[in-house]
Image: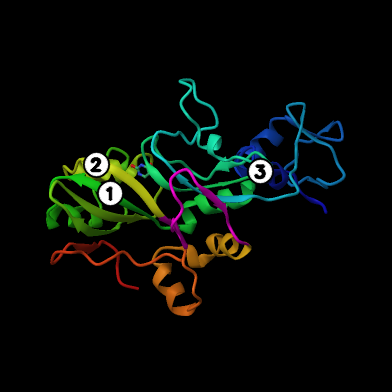
Amino acid sequence: MLERLQKIISAAGITSRRASEALIQGGQVAVNGVVVTELGSKADPSKDTITVDGKVLKVSEQRLYILLNKPPGYITALKDSQSRPLVTDLLKDVPDRVYPVGRLDYNTEGLLLLTNDGEWANRLMHPRHEIEKEYHVRVRGKVIDQQLKRMAEGVELEDGKTAPAVVNLVKSGEQNDWISVAIHEGRNRQVRRMCEAVSLSVVRLKRIRYGTLALGTLRAGQFRYLSDVEVRELAGDQAKTSSIVKSDKSDKSDRSDRPKKTPRPERSGGKFSGRRQQ
Ligand code: URA
């Protein structure tokens, strides 16, 4: 089937749609030996030989969608100059190369998606889709309502004020409190920096939900393949902010890995949303 070249290149997972366009315009792409610089040119990946910088583009027939419970102490890059463990080291017997969808810090744990479908990954990461990511954060000492409220309303960071978030106190312990933070932006080290901005010291950070997908019962280092329904749901509009309540209401099927609403706080107050009610 004929498809636009930039779509074929980004779907092969090597780069984004926009960067693929730049490759084409820069004369780095050839179809059957002929350099193509015009955007909108088409090719058939099952018949044509497409090269990028002289290397034949490998178009995988099989699309892979993986949910990994990333342990701390792994990096989401595909190689590391310091030879630290890579998340892809954990993917034993996965038949093709897959790429992380976004990133988690070296010491952040929890839900990480990986795929060889560049189009799907781009869609998920595009700010327009505002997919909500939820984190559980263990913080040193006790939090006060004012700190949660400030995080929920948005805090000033060096790259601008954060968008309204949903912030809850989840559990209160002797030495530490656990809070949940749901955001739809994807800035570098965002949750850690939001905590720092209100003088909270992060002891542990774990992503427990990505849009409609919950981490569920996977143990650290384990992974599973997503179902077709999960792949479609996640890239659809229902994965947007606050979709969880909607999808729980509309689908009563017993899916144990469906996201649960964050448990109610154990002390009074402690639940803050900087978002308007819909
Ligand atoms: N926010 C962070 O601070 N770190 C992550 O890894 C993810 C979100």
Residue 220: x, y in percent? 43, 45
* Residue denoted by label 3: 10
* Residue denoted by label 2: 202
Q: Secondary structure at mark 2?
A: strand
Q: Of tags 1 and 3, which is closer to the observer? A: 1
Q: Between marks 3 and 2, how big is the CA–CA gap? A: 36 Å
Q: Which residues are magenta?
A: 209-227
The answer to whether residue 76 is magenta is: no
> From the Cβ of disc 2, is ligand 1 less than 8 Å away?
yes
Q: Is residue 80 above or below residue 213?
A: above
Q: Is residue 201 above or below residue 152?
A: above
Residue type (three-letter) at the residue carrying disc 1: Val
The N terminus sits in image quarter:
bottom right
> Looking at the image, do the residues carrying marks 1 and 2 touch, with CB atoms under 8 Å apart?
yes
Q: Earlier in the sequence, mark 1 or mark 3?
A: 3
Q: Earlier in the sequence, mark 1 or mark 2?
A: 1
Q: Is residue 246 left or right of residue 48?
A: left
Residue 137: x, y in percent? 28, 49
Q: Between marks 1 and 3, how big is the CA–CA gap? A: 34 Å
- Which one is nearer the viewer's eye here, 259 or 254? 254
Q: Is residue 65 left or right of residue 58?
A: left
Q: Is residue 184 left or right of residue 102?
A: left
* Residue denoted by label 1: 137
Q: Secondary structure at mark 1?
A: strand
Q: Between marks 1 and 2, how big is the CA–CA gap? A: 7 Å
Crowd band around label 2 with a 10 angstrom C-alpha radius: few (<14), some (14–19), many (20+): some
Q: Secondary structure at mark 3?
A: helix
Residue type (three-letter) at the residue carrying disc 3: Ser
Q: Is residue 94 above or below residue 82?
A: below
Dominant secondary structure (helix, strand or loop) of the stretch shown in magenta: loop
Residue 246: x, y in percent? 43, 74
